[in-house]
Amino acid sequence: MLILSRRPGESISIGDDVMVTVIGVSGDRVKIGIEAPQHILILREELREAVREENRAGYQVTPKEIRAAIDFLQRLLEPPSREPTDSR
Amino acid sequence: MPHQMLERSLELTFPEGLVGYPEWSRFTLEELPDGGPVAMLQSQDVEEISFLVTVPRLVCPSYAFDTPPSVRQLLGLSGDEEPAALCVLVVRQDPLVITANLLGPLLYNPATGLAYQLVLNTSTYSAQHPVVPAGPR
């Protein structure tokens, strides 16, 4: 890992398109500004990690789990009288 | 009915794999016998890999998110077409708890079968949204 020291207001460029700027430091929090093309998705790493963890937890299903999931979800389809929604 | 939104035996290709598992790219979305709103996302590469999935709005009626332009492009969506969405269900035993991953929806284009797991850039939705059945158990 490349480690650089920067002061507030200073930047790091990554390739031609990405610029990371330290906006400010307050206690143990660092405020960072990122300029990048729209096609680059920028995420807090813990969100990605949470999704990865659920993929890991969910990729092996047993018949018992299938039964339990169907049982739970089927009940959501029953009353109260809610109009069906689409998948979006 | 919401469960009819699940396509029958649709092949889905995730060109970038799933989050954390870039090699998991080819799946089939399969109906389950008497599965109602629950379907199985079965890996075409590794038989042991399969997920239970459902339609997110079934477990969270207000569920909504924006699809980034780059993802729309990857899925081959044109104009104002919106992707279909699924969420992964995780079943935990003792006590029995079922959660839905609303933070990382599986988006796909039903016309092309192209799919992408998006990580939402928000704290609004949980990766472990509890699924609570209506009525007494």
Image (cartoon, coloured by chain):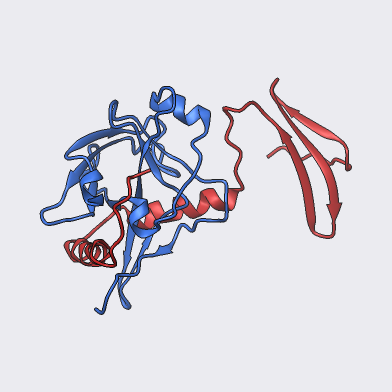
Q: Nearer the viewer, residue B136 or A25?
A: B136
Q: Nearer the viewer, residue A87 or A36?
A: A87
Establish if B42 lies above or below A58: above
Q: Nearer the viewer, residue B62 or B52?
A: B62
Which residue is rendered at x = 37% and y = 53% of the image? B57
Establish if A64 lies above or below B68: below
Q: State the hue of chain A.
A: red
Residue A15 rendering spot, x and y as whole percentages: 69, 23
For residue B132, which quarter of the picture? bottom left
- What is the total number of numbered labels drawn onto the structure image? 0
| Quadrant including the C terminus of chain A | top left
Residue B25 rendering spot, x and y as whole percentages: 33, 35
Which residue is rendered at x = 23% and y = 44% of the image? B6
Residue A58 rendering spot, x and y as whole percentages: 33, 56
Which residue is rendered at x = 82% and y = 41% of the image? A22
Q: State the hue of chain B.
A: blue
Which residue is rendered at x = 31% and y = 60% of the image? A82
Q: Please state if B56 lies on the left or on the right of A22 as rendered.
A: left
